[in-house]
Image (tube, rainbow, N blue to C red):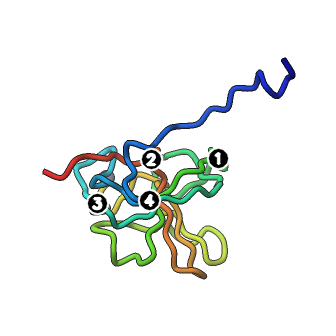
Amino acid sequence: MTEEEKTIEVKNNYDHLIAEEKNKHTVYCTKCPSKILSSTMGKHSKIQFNLPYMSQRKNFESVECELLSDYWMVPDMFMFDNIGFSKTVEFGLKYLICADCEIGPIGWYDDKTKLSYLALSRVKHAEDS
Ligand SMILES: [Zn+2]
């Protein structure tokens, strides 16, 4: 076996959350009952982005990041039920935070394309009740 073959690629399988490339379930905050996104509003996107680790604070001083590659792409910020934005981090880039408890970042918003990306691993998925 070569070194490459022995390497275990750590990746999450989110197939059960995806239906026709959209989010099958309603998306909630992991820390509070706030509803973030209705089902089918986000499109599954494979895109690599370094997202800073979750913090309890609104302003993210830490630069420690996690490379995440599964996101719900939301083409219009008004499609969210509830979402908050951090202050602009770089030109045209903001982090998404929970509108109620301000936990985050749970994704990022690109002001140039107007697209929002919500990290699958940073939110809770639940069946519609
Ligand atoms: Zn919250």
Q: Which of pointers 1 and 2 lies earlier in the amino acid sequence?
A: 1
Q: Tell me how far mark 4 sits from mark 3, CA to CA.
A: 11 Å
* Amino acid of disc 2: Arg
Q: Which of pointers 2 and 4 lies earlier in the amino acid sequence?
A: 4
Q: Tell me how far mark 4 sits from mark 1, CA to CA.
A: 21 Å
Residue farthest to the right, as pictured? 2
Give the class, few, some or many, for how many residues have Cα within 10 Å of label 1's Cα (few <14, many ≥20).
few
Q: Tell me how far mark 3 sits from mark 1, CA to CA.
A: 25 Å
Which residue is disc 3 drawn over?
A: 39
- Residue 13 placement (x, y as % from top left): 49, 38
Q: Which of pointers 4 and 1 lies earlier in the amino acid sequence?
A: 4
* Above or below for 109 versus 104: below
Which residue is disc 4 drawn over?
A: 21
Please name which of the two marks, 3 or 1, marks the residue nearer to the observer.
3
- Residue 60 placement (x, y as % from top left): 56, 55
Determine if the C-beta at disc 4 is less than 8 A from ligand 1. Answer: no
Q: Which mark is residue 67?
A: 1
Q: Which of pointers 2 and 3 lies earlier in the amino acid sequence?
A: 3
Please name which of the two marks, 2 or 4, marks the residue nearer to the observer.
4
* Above or below for 47 versus 32: below
Left/right placement of residue 76 relative to residue 113 reads left
- Residue 32 placement (x, y as % from top left): 26, 48
- Residue 77 placement (x, y as % from top left): 40, 76
Which residue is disc 2 drawn over?
A: 122
Q: Tell me how far mark 2 sits from mark 4, CA to CA.
A: 18 Å
* Amino acid of disc 4: Glu
Determine if the C-beta at disc 3 is less than 8 A from ligand 1. Answer: no
Q: Quadrant of residue 10?
A: top right
In front: 17, or 99?
17
* Amino acid of disc 3: Ser
